[in-house]
Amino acid sequence: MTQIEILPKTEMKMPNVFLHPPHLPLIAPSILAADFAKLGAEAADVQRCGADLLHIDIMDGHFVPNLTMGPDIVLALARSGGLMQDVHLMVSNPDEHFEAFAKAGAKHLTFHIEVRHDESALDMIKRIHDLGCTAGVCLNPATPVEALGRSMGEADLILVMSVVPGFTGQAFMPEVLEKVKFLRQELGAHQRLEIDGGIGIRTAHQALEAGADVLVAGAAVFRNPERAQTIKLLRGDYPK
Ligand code: DX5
Ligand code: ZN
């Protein structure tokens, strides 16, 4: 059995911005596009540049082809302080890892509805809530909203993928905007609607118009020297 490192309670007091958003939309740069040789500095830089969250892409080489990070990275980033982490679990067995990520300091966990597991999505949401985190449910581009079933009413956040997950820097798939429009009508005002993949200034505008209120952006923020200006523009803060 692997050792789970635990973030001290004093370091776990950070408010959950999905429950108490200071404004909308929220901008969540994806650390997957950062320079991995200086993760702490990269996280601090996007916070200084106005980001609301840090999106953490966890990939297992099975549910998606790529391999990325685990709870130790979440723990290290939580210890370095700063932004709340929005943990996106692209793994085949997410429920086996919920506890480790929560103990590492994650305040929010999103799993994919496409994973086949004995536990229902409703049970997985309950387990995440019992760990003191908000719960998100994610839909791949090819997955219809009907797949959400009753989890649509219980999740704190629905994440619509606008690329096939696996890698940063892919092209936005505009056909998912219909799902975003539909979901915005169905979700309550307290439920967040996030979009992830290929978000840049132009596609952010389309996603916001369709009703998304949390934008993930990897390459557009981290591979750009004008990060503060880009985050403003993604938010829809255009110069008058
Ligand atoms: C895709 C990941 C995304 C990705 C976004 O598999 O879930 O979060 O890092 O990167 P960009 O914004 O570059 O498409
Ligand atoms: Zn993601």
Image (cartoon, rainbow, N blue to C red):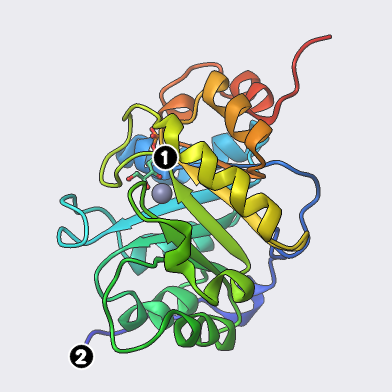
Which residue corresponds to the image point at 61% horizontal and 43% vertical from the top-left? 181
For disc 2, the marked residue is 1
Image height of 124 relative to 50, above or below: below
Residue 71's quadrant in the figure?
bottom left
x, y percentage for residue 44? 56, 41
> As rendered, which of 67 and 140 lies closer to the eye?
140
Image height of 139 relative to 232, above or below: below
Q: Is residue 48 left or right of residue 179?
A: right
Q: How far apart are marks 2 and 1 (CA)?
A: 36 Å
x, y percentage for residue 43? 51, 43
Location of the N terminus by quadrant is bottom left
Residue 58's quadrant in the figure?
bottom left
Label 1 CB-ligand 1 distance < 8 A = yes
Label 2 CB-ligand 2 distance < 8 A = no
x, y percentage for residue 26? 67, 44
For disc 1, the marked residue is 162
Residue 178 got which mark? none
For marks 2 and 1 on the same chain, the one whose residue lies earlier in the sequence:
2
Image height of 191 relative to 172, above or below: below
> As rendered, which of 142 and 12 lies closer to the eye?
142
Residue 97's quadrant in the figure?
bottom left
Which residue corresponds to the image point at 38% horizontal and 67% vertical from the top-left? 113
SS of the residue at dot 2? loop
